Image (cartoon, coloured by chain):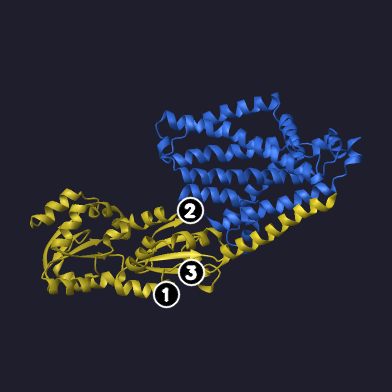
Amino acid sequence: MHQRAMSIGRIALYIWIAASLAGAFIEYRPSPSRVVWLSLEAAQEKAQRENKYIYLDVYAAWCAPCRQMDKLVFTNDSVRMMLNTRLVPARVNIDDTTGGRVRSRFNIQALPTSLILYPDGIEAKRVVGFQDASSFLQWLEDTSFSVFSSWQVFDSARETAQRTNRPILVLLLRTRADLDQVRRVFGGGKIQDLIRSRYVPSLLLYESETDRRILDTLRTQLPETAGAGLLIFHGDGSLQRHIWLTTPAVSEDFLLRQLGDGSSS
Amino acid sequence: MTGWQQLLRLELKRIWNLFTLVGVGFFTFLGVMISSSMRHPDAHQILLRTHTGLLVIVTALFAIGVVANDIKEGWLRTLLVRPIRREHYLAVRILAIFISALIALLVVATLPVLITLINSGRLGELNLFRVMGFYLLFACQILLVIMMATALSCWVPGAFNVFLLGAWAMVAGFAEFQVRTRYWDTMWIVTLQEFLLPGGFSETIEALGRHSVLQWDSLLWGVAALAGFTAFAFWSITRVRVDTTSE
């Protein structure tokens, strides 16, 4: 009587073994991701060289949502293109020696953690947990931080300005926090078009040591009451005019008027 | 009519009593409340969210004491003195509960969702193939819950099989929360937690609903869990001592 019951049970047992093995194989097989991942150090070097932002993926081999990101998100063509061409993709395994350092440096509290870093390695923004391809792409694209991603470092801007015979537009701010306030204004389509067509844009921050050294070389040309503002230089580096901003939260109209008609204030 | 068809008819008659009809009526009211209160922009999500919660509860209610009560009431002994094998009884019992739970789900969840979507003129937003995929996975999930409840019912008395399932789910949910918040960086705890409660089918449903992607690994884990509990249930029924408990 028990023989038949055991045979049904045995068939189910074989299916259990086969499905478990197949499930484990599919879940734990090497990632099909085609993103060109770099180490954080290499990515930082590249990002500074190319003036791009870094995408940092903090993951672990045993983290299921991380594996899902590999399978469903990093294989997506749009995501792959975005990461490989517009950003410098880096990834760190939390269990590696670098993982410990990254964990404390960026205060990682869950996996996976996706971070966008400025070229100098400072965090711009983060998202924690699994994101599907479309929301991840939206997160990457909706980066008000990317408003400034095509802006060049001052020295390159000077070279481009000389070559193209266009003035350099420098946004001068105290901290990155001020940058957050002006992102919305500079992210507008009209102002972006205006800047792209007439100027070579660059960004200088008082809080950055490198930028402060550049500002020191320009000190003689700058008024003594230097605060946040827009500086417009000729291609040769001489100051053409300046627009001081009493508050970083200016309106797009104000900027369009100031930059569009060529008047100084 | 063959023997197993007669037995199936008998089992269905036993399941669909007045108490069941009242219960289905109550859950249909609940389904109407849930689906009509949803304001999700994706019609598929309204369908999914209404079904997933009700599916487990409704199935678990049908599977209360699935074997244990039959032993206690002497029904299993009555059947086994006839030329009916244990696996024959169990297969038909499971099939009857499966059919009943599926019908109940159509009434308590599908019907309210359809009414809600027709009323709001959003029925056309549903993709037929995706919806068929959902129902196939719902059926698998129902079968898994039945198998788990059946296997447990061979070992524990009365409604304890469903209580144990509920406690199991609660412990797994609590463990998941603890792992997410406190032990998210400990490999073996995270890995162990993934196997605490079979969630292959529910993860596949979730992925199909949210990302329109069929997650093969989750599906296979679901199939593995279903096969594992089927094997356990059919092995467990051979270990049930009918004669001593039926008197």
Query: Chain letter of disc 2?
Result: B
Query: Chain letter of disc 3?
Result: A
Give the residue pinned by disc 1.
A41
Tell me the kind of residue under disc 2: Val
**Given this view, does label 1 or label 3 mark the residue nearer the observer?**
3
**Given this view, does label 2 or label 1 mark the residue nearer the observer?**
2
Q: Is residue A21 visible?
A: yes
| Residue at figure coordinates x 69%, y 53% from the top left | B227
- Marks 1,3: beta carbons within 8 A: no
Label 1 residue SS: helix
The answer for how far apart the CA atoms under marks 2 and 1 are is: 35 Å
Whether callout 2 and callout 1 share a subunit is answered no
Tell me the kind of residue under disc 3: Val
Give the residue pinned by disc 2.
B213
Q: Nearer the viewer, residue B176 or A209?
A: B176
Give the residue pinned by disc 3.
A92
| Residue at figure coordinates x 44%, y 63% from the top left | A74
Query: Chain letter of disc 1?
Result: A
Label 2 residue SS: loop
- In the rendered image of the structure, the colour used to display chain B is blue
Q: Position of residue B82 (x, y in %)?
A: 86, 38
| Residue at figure coordinates x 51%, y 61% from the top left | A66
N-terminal of the two: label 1 or label 3? Answer: 1
Question: The chain coloured yellow carries which letter?
Answer: A
Q: Is residue B170 visible?
A: no
Mark 1: give few (<14), some (14-19) or many (20+) Cα within 10 Å.
Answer: few
